[in-house]
Image: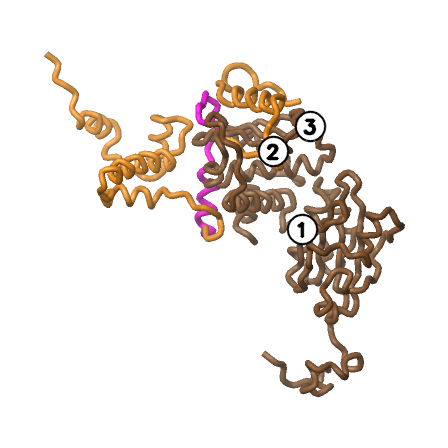
Amino acid sequence: MPREKTPNDESDFFDKLFGDPAELADEDLNLLFDALAPGSDVKVTIHNIAESAAVKYRSQNRLPPDHVQTALDATKEAKSLENVTPSKLHQIVEAIKEPFTRPVSDPVFAYRNRTGKLDSDDQAIIDNLTEELQSDWDEGEEKEGK
Amino acid sequence: MRPAAQLASLLAEKFVTTWPPDLMQICKDLGLRVRDVPAKGFDGVLIRSRNGQKGIIAVNGSIREYARKRFTIAHEIGHFIIPHHRLLGNVCEEGTIESFDSRLNRAEVEANEFAAELLLPTAILKTRFNLNEFSLHQIAAVAAESSTSLTATMRSFLEMTALPCALVWSVANQAQWCARSDSFKFFLPLTELPSEASFAARIFKGQAFSSEFVPVPANAWLDNSTAERVPVLLEHSIPLPNYTAVLTMLWAYKIDYSPEEHENDGLLEDLAPEDFTLRRRRWPR
């Protein structure tokens, strides 16, 4: 009879495949993350996990433990570039990856000089573009822009 | 250089091989598609994956000026690259309308700074501008060469020059915003500008205007107390009918006092006339 899967099985599996992830170099860790969760940003993902953990602790009137708070602090996004150091700016550019072309489901929007509410024609444009963004760009040739 | 401009400069080192930069190639390298759309309610929009490096920049097809389209694309590239900007967009699925809170405004400024440096790199402008000459001719030539707008090019000039000069953007006879060089330290009371005595106001009235810098009473643009410190203020206003706007170039051509002209200046009565000559030995700190 097969034994039940225990919480440690997954980490044992990774240990066997890659060794101890904590000892991996940043680059290797990024490669591993890319392979496991293509198209997503490791920093954002870790922040989201830490944030949801912190919310759970706070909803129980408990302080998030140190490791959760450390993860939150380390992955917190700056609110402006004002105090960002030149080396951090270098890191931002170095972190630019190959374009991701697979389907996505997390669209966000930033408008320039938007005047009030979008009418139905504008909304249709946005809907079409959103559909295009979410689709698999590897399927067929890229549609040429007009 | 502002951090957003530094970021644009670093991005250019990695992705730009031509000048003017090939924005379509940059977009392709970054995972961005560009679309021309018949929108009515916005100039441009960036639709991106929050977490993935994938996005679409759509530009309003009714924008006639090529330079403005390029600035819009460069601005959206800025939003795409600056990490915290991904958190500012509104998610249409939630039916929220874009809000212009202070954080968003700051992001818009950063995206503009990014776009300006991407399109008008400081290193290249240093070789193109004569920074001792504030002239429409020179700025228009650089704007044409770099496929950028007159306004964006002029802003870049003001950030680099040591001349005391400024630009004021007015629409429908009301000043909207201004930009100044570091040495133009005079307050511009925008809500009261352009005044009747300015050439900009004459343009809005459909009257004749000069095609070069001409002296104007300093209090046509500055408040009276400040105007006293500017014996010669030059103005060159340019009509921009597509925007019902006037772009005004101001140059505080002469701001030094001379002892002969200000012998009775009460603020200076404790200083000897020789203090204003090269024979002066000590200067106030």
**Way the structure is coloured:** by chain
Name the spot of residue B95 as percent of width and height, x first: 49, 27
What kind of residue is marked 1? Trp
Secondary structure type for disc 1: strand
Disc number lying in front (3 or 1): 1
Above or below for A58 versus A18:
below
Residue pointed to by mark 2: A116
Residue found farthest to the right: B208
Instruction: Left or right? Give the position of B67 relative to A84.
Output: right
Residues shaded magenta: A85-107
Chain under numbered label 2: A
The residue that label 3 is drawn on is B61
Please name the color used to draw chain A: orange
Q: Is residue A22 magenta?
A: no
Chain brown in the figure, letter: B
- Which of A45/B271 is in front? B271
